[in-house]
Image (tube, coloured by chain):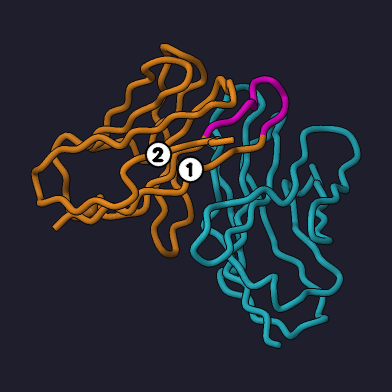
Chain colours: A cyan, B orange
Amino acid sequence: AQSVSQHNHHVILSEAASLELGCNYSYGGTVNLFWYVQYPGQHLQLLLKYFSGDPLVKGIKGFEAEFIKSKFSFNLRKPSVQWSDTAEYFCAVNEGRDDKIIFGKGTRLHILP
Amino acid sequence: NAGVTQTPKFQVLKTGQSMTLQCAQDMNHNSMYWYRQDPGMGLRLIYYSASEGTTDKGEVPNGYNVSRLNKREFSLRLESAAPSQTSVYFCASSGISLGTGELFFGEGSRLTVL
């Protein structure tokens, strides 16, 4: 069964620091990969997605992620975080063979002003 | 543009009571989902439906039933609610089978079981 691991449960950074959040998945076949963000009191919004092609994916708000197939990873990065990036971030995986989409447990990001 | 609409937004039940969460989408998506969100557990998939007339179990289906009434609607039923089902429930839809993939979420339903 597919699974998704997010290693960082809670990250605290200062503004302008660089960010990298880890995501690993277990499925060995074709996958579609997502990062979602949930701001306090809101539902999830898509940051970026990878279906195929260039493994370096750029999303909204300056976020990007790199798909490394050999490492089963899809880490989220941002060169310089802002206070407004304070939120919870979720990695999600879809096995290409069906419509099931599984989420990781999330990483709570807190940016200090 | 309504997107995904789920009702009710809040509900308090006593142990053993039943209820149905309703969800409808107007984006002509084939795939619909029910997730529950609990602190520290992320979103866990309860059931999903790849198309009208089909449903499949997700990660935590026990204690729940679903119905894909038509392409627009996907309901989640708790037959005999338990305190462990206290959670925030999200309905979502996606065109993933068409290659677009993004999940569109409803506003969530906060359920408390006493």
In the displayed structure, B56 sits above or below B91; it is above
In the shown orientation, is residue B67 left or right of residue A21? left
Look at the numbered discs 1 and 2 and tell me whether their residues touch, using CB distance below 8 Å: yes
- Label 1 belongs to which residue? B106
Q: Which residue is mark 2?
A: B6
Q: Is residue B28 left or right of residue B40?
A: right
Q: Crowdedness of circle 1 by 10 Å Cα count: few (<14), some, many (20+)?
A: many
Return the chain for callout 2: B
Q: Report the amino acid beneath label 1.
A: Gly
Q: Quadrant of residue B30?
A: top right
The residue that appears at 79% across and 54% down in the rendered structure is: A60
Q: Which residues are magenta?
A: B93-101
Above or below: residue A106 compared with residue B36: below
Could you give the CA–CA distance between mark 1 and mark 2, rounded to whole angstroms? 6 Å
Look at 47% across and 21% down and name the residue there: B72
Q: Is residue A40 magenta?
A: no
Instruction: Kindly identify the residue that appears in the image at 41 percent across and 24 percent down.
Output: B73
What kind of element bears circle 1?
A: loop
